[in-house]
Image (cartoon, grey):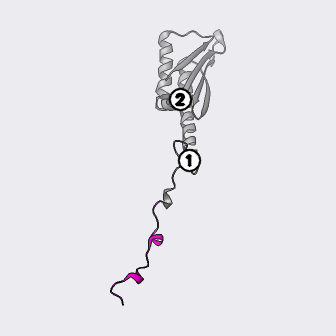
Amino acid sequence: MKIALLLKDLQVTASDRQRIQDRIRVALTRFTPLIRGLTVTISDENGLRGGVDKKCRLVVRLHAGTVVVNEQADAVLEAVTLAAERAARSVARVHHRTVDARQAAPGVGRAGRGSLDHSRAVPTAKEHSLDLSRCNPLRD
């Protein structure tokens, strides 16, 4: 999974950058086949003044839509962890909705083609019943 990491008004070390990417990968690994792109923007809103000002924005582009998550915290890694966990829940929700919609739509198969209606593939006993009363060789 390719992660585009953007930093605004913030300096992070190479090890912190790796930790950020690792936290996001851990949270979203199970959805890798669904994800087309992932952008992480981390910013320091208040600069040197401090406070709850580390902001993390995750934009997850899926085949079924886009998930955008914003979180704020005291520390960068805390904001990233909160955003990654929330993004994982949101991606799961979007995925389940698309799966449920596909299952509810009649005549739409997995590949987008119409599915077969197997309820009538085997003829019923009534359709195949033969009137054997006229063919009985013992009766005369």
Determine whether the residue tagged by mark 1 lies in a helix, strand or loop. Answer: loop
Determine whether the residue tagged by mark 2 lies in a helix, strand or loop. Answer: strand
x and y percentages locating residue 40 in the rendered image: 58, 20
Q: Residue furthest left?
A: 138
Q: Residues within 10 Å of mark 2 (few under 14, many from 20)?
A: many
Q: Residue furthest bottom?
A: 140
x and y percentages locating residue 125 in the rendered image: 44, 70
Residue on which disc 2 sits: 35
Q: CA distance from mark 1 to mark 2?
A: 23 Å
User: What is the tally of numbered marks visible in this picture?
Assistant: 2
Q: Does the magenta run of residues contain 71?
A: no
Magenta segment, which residues?
121-140
Q: Quadrant of the C terminus?
A: bottom left
x and y percentages locating residue 110 in the rendered image: 51, 43
Mark carried by residue 108: 1
**Residue at horizontal 51%, vertical 14%?**
17
Mark carried by residue 39: none
Mark 1 residue type? Val
- Given this view, does label 1 or label 2 mark the residue nearer the observer? 1
Mark 2 residue type? Ile
Q: Is residue 116 above or below residue 79?
A: below
x and y percentages locating residue 21 in the rendered image: 50, 19
**Residue at horizontal 56%, vertical 30%?**
87
Q: Does the magenta run of residues contain 122?
A: yes
